[in-house]
Image: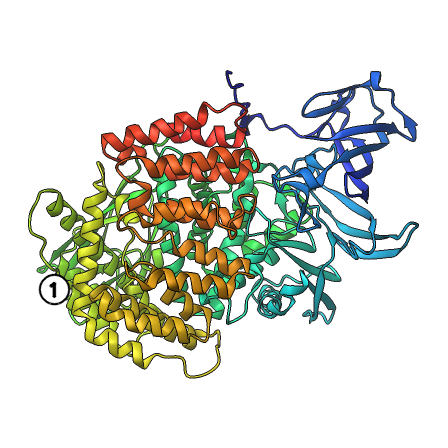
Amino acid sequence: MQQEVLKTVYLKDYQPTPFVITHVDLHFDLYEEKTDVRSKMQVKLRQKDFVGSPLVLTGENLKLISVKIDGKLVDSSQYSLTEENLILNEVPEDFILEIHNEIKPHENTSLEGLYKSNGNYYSQCEAEGFRKITFFYDRPDVMATYTTTIEADKSQYPVLLSNGNRKASGDSSNGRHWCVWEDPFKKPSYLFALVAGDLQVNRDSFITCTGRSINLEIYTRSEDADKCDFAMQSLKNAMKWDEEVYGLECDLDHYMIVAVSDFNMGAMENKGLNIFNTSAVLASPSSATDRIYERIESVVGHEYFHNWTGNRVTCRDWFQLCLKEGLTVFRDQEFSSSLGSKEVNRIKMVSELRLRQFPEDAGTMAHPVRPDSFASIDNFYTATVYEKGAEICRMLFVVLGREGFRKGIDLYFARHDGQAVTIEDFIASLSDANSVDLQEYLDWYYQAGTPEVKAHGAYNADLRTYTLTLKQSCKPTPGQSIKKALPIPNLMGLLDQQGHDMPLQLSGEENISESQKLIVLRKNEEEWTFTNVKQKPIPSLFRQFSAPINLSFDYSDEELIFLLAKDNDNFNRWNAAGILFEKTIIGLSDSYVEGKSLVAPEMIANALKSVYMDESLDRSFRALLLNVTSLAEISQKMQDISVEGLYQGRKFMLESVARTMEDCALDLFHKNQDLGPYEFNIEAVGRRDLKNRSLFLLRHANGEKAKSLILSQLQNATNMTDEYAALSLLTDIDCAEREDALDAFYQKWKNNDLVLNAWISAQMIPMEKDYAYEKAQELLKHPAFNALNPNKVWALVGGFCLNFVQFHHASGRGYQFVASQMISLDRTNPQVAARFARAFSDWQRMDKGRQQLMQGELHRILAEKNLSKNTREVVSKALG
């Protein structure tokens, strides 16, 4: 069967709708076998130019019962119905449209639209899920106010929720009840939300800067009600931060969060009724790690900040997705940094960017931050849109400064509150508020790929000048063979031989001397000359990662060790360690492939040991220094990747460093034990980070010797951070105790789905032998796994994709396993299935044998009958 041609939507074809919808009354009657949906819309012609235009509404998997215009039934001969649209050809210029349709949420496994999970009803309408509820202009530039009435069985669904403020409720006949919600703010359909079920509520309140009291509610299943305190406090912290930093106050009387285990995303910012994946809400010291606490804080902040950057001001079209997501990610990053270590948080952000987004830019699925076309918008919820979008906002923040950026954001809201806008509107607000021209930064949104910046420095001892030359380039990406020069901010310093920042004065400047300086590379090549430089400096470039680029500078190992030990910018200290790891591992990999002896990097190991023992440094920062670069990240810098060579090179490097640091690691492991009850703060998190990184080093110095420490921590841990750290390390050791420990952990936590997801992921870690592959096959049939639950799919299939050696096994079995899971998933949840295709996007950099195997599996997926447009689009792009 030949697949239908994908229908592509283009940014250049954007047109406003002929009609606007100003208000929507929705009525839901929830029954077990169906849901009756009645919508009543106030529809008006947008402008006279559109007189005579048909009204074309979108709907998917809906059973149409009736259509009325101004109270009169419309005969079926007066409208046409296709698989995707309800078309009314002759309609008045101003009228009331009523539509009655049926849906079946209990059969909806896509988790889009209205669906059932564990007996409760939930909705997910971003990006195009509202069309699975009723016929509508399901696009972000159609903004209306909503009144929603929900009626359901009272005993089964005592909680009935929707957007806005609760206006009325009561009982109806036959044991049913109803509730009316009114949202006074205009919103697009993707922000609509409905929840009905047997849920327990946790209540609190927040007093705003103007003295208003906001009711805060978090709804969960009763068994999870004791795990919401941290999410509630994070919400209050976010509300306070947004008032203090941006002057933005919560605009509703109620703010609600609902936690659901079956959810495709981390969370959704529906106006006043955020629906969250349980993994981003529930936490207790016994069942959640420090990383989970950090994620909850970030995601809760992110969705709350969307109330303004996304809801009050939204996207004109889905091509502008980066407008709301990039800006809001930047805001949630700044929020998290304000509550923890700013430098540690920045390092984690960049590490995530390099691990997830840089490969997108380098592969067959590279796309601009604002794409110019798509077949399914669901496929563009990517690291490029989110994380790279945030980096563009951060560059603008660096260029304008905190005060200038705030002025721009203030003008953005003043101009566009209640509107659906574009990134051009955003840049114009920042520009106009600061009387500067920032239009050049729009190219960052238009152009795909990660810029490569080559730097060269030349010191003239006679003239006491230092000349820095920067050259930028960008490799061709799909659809963009020719690249423009981008504005690239470089926050830099020059270090003297003692590691102090030297005064910086550019040639031609008068009386300007700074310890660090912001210069912007705008051309393909530029140079800057610094005067009064009294000794040959070592440059510290792109501090705080001031632009999302790949930097190439011919540092010697000695200079990198100097930066690691002395740089005043901790990001660049961490980055120097990463470069040392990368250079060494690639060299060891080459030696392994060539059959040469591998030489231990003693100088580097001793340098790392010195910094690791420095008590003046943040403990979490010291732990991050020994977070050895992953195989996936290193492979991005290589062509014709040797999987075995990289693995053996990294293993040798890690074991060599660990043996050098064994004594100090053992000392720090004992010194940083928890002294009391679990606390989530900078000091306590840092202590656990350093202790568990030390245990990691001990395991790689001598696994058998460290095993007793690991087993002891696993058995005696008083928090999940320590328990899971020990389990992960033990799972990576081929020993008799491994299976007993995994079974004991399962028996202990078998009633906690979120912890079991971590248990599944741990078994995907080992790269040696066939363990992870064989476990993946077993776990597909295990009671802990459920193919309809996205969290479990990500734990198993996603965890396996992250196992570089097993996914890229020379036999091709890893590719076959993931492809088979994609085919199966596509039948129930195309959105999740499509995301795994990204694991194949680096096939062009593998050896010829693996290239053929990866391509073969992608072609096998494409050959499937009735493949969703989600998966078909991503797989087609992965093939290039």
Specify the quadrant of the image occupied by residue 73.
top right
Quadrant housing residue 108:
top right
Q: Is residue 79 above or below residue 775?
A: above
Render colour scheme: rainbow
- 719 with respect to 413 (left or right): left
Nearer to the camera, 745 or 30: 745
Q: Residue at x 61, y 58 (%)?
A: 304
Q: Residue at x 26, y 37 (%)?
A: 810
Residue 430 vs residue 498, the one in the foreground: 498
Residue kind at label 1, given as amino acid type: Glu
Q: Position of residue 485 (x, y in %)?
A: 34, 38
Q: Position of residue 514 (x, y in %)?
A: 30, 66
Q: Position of residue 133 (x, y in %)?
A: 72, 37
Check disc 1 and report its element: helix, strand or loop: helix
Is disc 1 surrounded by few (<14), some (14 to 19) or many (20+) residues within 10 Å?
A: few
Rendered residue at 14%/49% (across/down): 587
Mark yes or no: residue 481 visible. no
Image side of residue 705 versus residue 310, left or right? left
Horizontal side of residue 7 vs 148, given as left or right: left
Residue nearer the viewer, 295 or 199: 199
Task: Kindly tell me whether residue 151 is visible in this rendering.
Answer: yes
Q: Is residue 482 above or below residue 560?
A: above
Residue lying farthest to the left in this orientation: 596
- Residue 142 location in percent, x, y? 70, 37
Mark 1 = which residue? Answer: 602
